[in-house]
Image: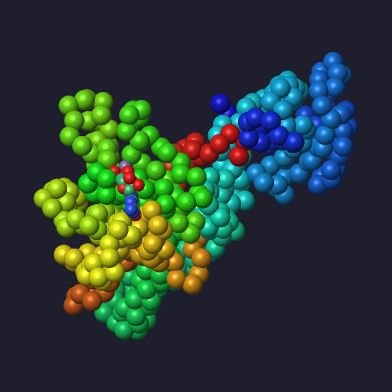
């Protein structure tokens, strides 16, 4: 399948809608347009036209828009046909385009292929292209806002500015390497250590900000642990509130629905209910439970729910023992509506190092504090700026760059100043940053990224 042949796809979501859009992209679409309409189309003008089949019978009528490359989404010629949004109409229109463009090799687009061409033609960098998919997939306003920030280049600009600072330092080092007699003075002469420190600080800022953006995209993982009847399901429903809880069957079995997605302030939270964790002989259920433990290992916070009327017992201790020790725990006493004022006052604020919160899931007491504390303990701390959206891939690249800059700093403080090693670590850090925007990227990586797009984007 040629990567340069013209492509076509239905760009709007499947199903019925007021309008449906067919999108075509190719190096040169004049011939196709001539076949379809028997005329030329003025670029960037809306033309109201009949869409006809090869026999001249009307399929639909609508708006045709032509964008002459490179001034288009993909950087190639782009033709958009806006017709009525019914599956049958769009199917016929799509078939008509394929037939009309046969001689030019017009074929159906692969998922994400329009955006991939935009990337290959330098209309977008890789982080921006990823933001296109993330904007479409955004499940909350906060995530959508951040995706737009990334799409408009805020994230890429920060990464590029940092890369430029590294390039500058690299140029100085590499120029010095050509004159070995100057190597000894290099670090002092150019204040290289201080410059490097400034770069490390900036990387740290970008990384922190990106971590917040990744939370918006990937969500926080929260585990609800506690004995039967302490109110886990009630709490989950109370937290979900108006926001209709989406129940995902992560086990792939129908019997234990243990993971739910809710939103707090637009932040997605994947909540795992440990009700699915009981001991069982059933193989299918055991597989489900193993996957639940995988989820729990990724948890950002564990909520240990207790009945405020009963003190912690062995079962609670057993629960605590099985949970991963590196994850912060929030201890929540539920049903405080059943306590007297004195009993409420007697609840501790801290217990074995964990923050204690009194709530009533039924009477909606303490839930706002719980929401805030949950986001806080789980690591959501966006500061004043709203973050750009980031993916795990970006975090890994930033962390690798951080690692190489750290090694560079070690070489810089080394007494015998191994300048070529210093230079090499800077080079590696620079490469890691470039992988974010896709300046150097493998076909495998591109394939992986764009294949997760929807068709027509
Ligand atoms: P789970 O087994 O931990 O999921 O507990 P459920 O959510 O099913 O709740 C068990 C029982 O406790 C139900 O009868 C709930 O109505 C009740 N319950 C839950 N939260 C509260 C609360 O805050 N106050 C009171 N009084 N009852 C509650
Ligand atoms: Zn339950």
Q: Residue furthest left?
A: 314
Q: Residue furthest bottom?
A: 189
Horizontal side, residue 433 vs residue 86: left or right: left
Q: Is residue 219 visible?
A: no
Instruction: Provide residue 239's location: percent of width, then percent of height.
Output: 42, 53
> Which residue is depicted at the point 82% across and 34% down?
62
In which quarter of the view is residue 167 placed? bottom left
Instruction: Provide residue 65's location: percent of width, then percent of height.
Output: 79, 40
For the N terminus, the image quarter is: top right
Residue nearest the observer in this picture, 108 or 325? 325
> Which residue is depicted at the point 38% across and 34% down?
249
Instruction: Provide residue 394's location: percent of width, then percent of height.
Output: 41, 54
> Which residue is depicted at the point 43% across and 42% down?
445
In which quarter of the view is residue 24 placed? top right
Residue nearest the observer in this picture, 144 or 375? 375
Q: Is residue 180 visible?
A: yes
Horizontal side, residue 73 vs residue 409: left or right: right
Residue nearest the observer in this picture, 75 or 352? 352
Instruction: Provide residue 449's location: percent of width, then percent of height.
Output: 47, 42
> Which residue is depicted at the point 59% across and 58% down?
152
For the C terminus, the image quarter is: top right
């Amino acid at each position: 399948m040629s990567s340069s042949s013209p492509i076509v796809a239905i760009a709007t979501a499947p199903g019925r809608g007021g309008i449906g859009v067919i999108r075509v992209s190719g190096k040169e679409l004049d011939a196709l347009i001539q076949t379809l309409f028997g005329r030329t189309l003025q670029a960037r003008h809306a033309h109201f036209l009949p869409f006809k089949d090869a026999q001249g019978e009307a399929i639909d009528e609508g708006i045709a828009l032509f964008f002459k490359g490179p001034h288009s989404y993909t950087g190639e010629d782009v033709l958009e046909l806006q017709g009525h949004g019914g599956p049958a109409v769009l199917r016929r229109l799509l078939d008509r385009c394929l037939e009309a463009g046969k001689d030019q090799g017009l074929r159906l687009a692969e998922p994400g292929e329009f955006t991939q061409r935009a990337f290959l033609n330098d209309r977008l960098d890789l982080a921006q292209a990823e933001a296109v998919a993330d904007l479409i997939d955004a499940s909350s306003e906060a995530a959508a806002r951040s995706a737009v920030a990334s799409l408009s280049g805020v994230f890429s600009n920060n990464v590029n500015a940092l890369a430029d600072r590294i390039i500058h330092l690299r140029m100085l080092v590499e120029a010095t390497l050509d004159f070995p007699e100057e190597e000894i003075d290099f670090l002092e002469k150019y204040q290289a250590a201080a410059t490097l420190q400034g770069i490390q600080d900036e990387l740290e800022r970008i990384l922190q900000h990106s971590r917040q953006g990744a939370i918006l995209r990937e969500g926080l993982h929260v585990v609800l642990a506690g004995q039967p009847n302490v109110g886990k399901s009630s709490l989950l429903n109370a937290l979900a509130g108006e926001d209709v809880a989406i129940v995902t069957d992560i086990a792939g079995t129908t019997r234990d629905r243990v993971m739910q997605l809710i939103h707090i302030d637009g932040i997605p939270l994947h909540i795992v209910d440990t009700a699915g964790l009981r001991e069982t002989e059933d193989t299918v259920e055991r597989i489900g439970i193993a996957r639940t433990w995988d989820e729990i290992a990724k948890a950002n916070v564990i909520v240990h729910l207790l009945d405020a009327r009963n003190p912690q017992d062995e079962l609670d201790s057993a629960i605590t023992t099985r949970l991963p020790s590196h994850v912060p725990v929030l201890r929540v006493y539920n049903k405080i509506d059943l306590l007297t004022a004195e009993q409420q006052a007697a609840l501790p604020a801290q217990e074995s190092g964990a923050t204690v919160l009194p709530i009533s899931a039924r009477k909606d007491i303490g839930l706002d504090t719980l929401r805030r504390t949950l986001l806080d303990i789980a690591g959501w701390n966006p500061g004043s700026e709203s973050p750009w959206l980031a993916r795990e891939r970006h975090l890994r690249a930033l962390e690798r760059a951080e690692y190489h800059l750290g090694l560079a700093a070690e070489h810089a403080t080394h007494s015998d100043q191994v300048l070529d090693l210093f230079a090499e670590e800077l080079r590696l850090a620079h490469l890691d940053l470039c992988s974010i925007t896709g300046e150097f990227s493998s076909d495998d990586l591109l394939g992986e990224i764009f294949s997760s797009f929807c068709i027509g984007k």
